Image (cartoon, helix red, strand yellow):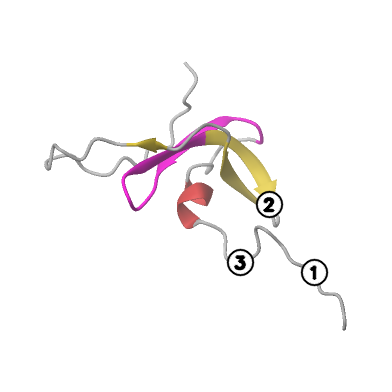
Amino acid sequence: MQATNAYAHSGPLNELAIKACVQKQRSKACRYQGVHNDLYIGTCQYMAESLLCVRNQPIQQLDTSNKNTKPDHSHEDTQR
C-alpha cells in the first residue's frame, strides 16, 4: 500500500469568499451571504495565493420570512 495525502480544503475556492475581500488587506473583517441564506463572518486570509474571507464566527441563518429581501453580498467591514 502506498500512502497518499488528503487535503481538508482542496478543491475550488469559494468565489463569494474571494469577492468579500476585494480591495481589502489581510486580517481585515469580512462577511458574505452563502447560497442558502447563511451569513459567513470572518477575516480576509490568503489561501492558494488568493485573499478570501475565512469564517471565524458561527454561521448565522438569515431570516427568509420577508420575500422582498435581496441577498446581501456586502463587502463592508463587520467591525465598526
Residue range (magenta): 26-41
Q: Distance between the residues labelled 2 and 3?
A: 12 Å
Q: In this view, does 73 lie to the left or right of 45?
A: left
Q: What residue type is labelled 1?
A: Asn
- Which label lies toward us, 1 or 2? 1
Q: Which amino acid does label 3 sit on?
A: Gly
32 relative position to 7: left or right = left
Q: Give the residue at mark 1.
A: 5
Sequence-wise, the earlier of marks 3 and 1 is 1
58 in the magenta segment: no
Give the SS element for disc 2: strand
Query: Earlier along the polypeptide chain: callout 2 or callout 3?
Result: 3
User: Is 72 left, or right, of 28 in this rendering?
Assistant: left
Q: Which residue, given by chain and number where applicable, does mark 2 sit on?
A: 47
Residue 72 image-quadrant placement: top left
Q: Nearer the viewer, mark 3 or mark 1?
A: 1
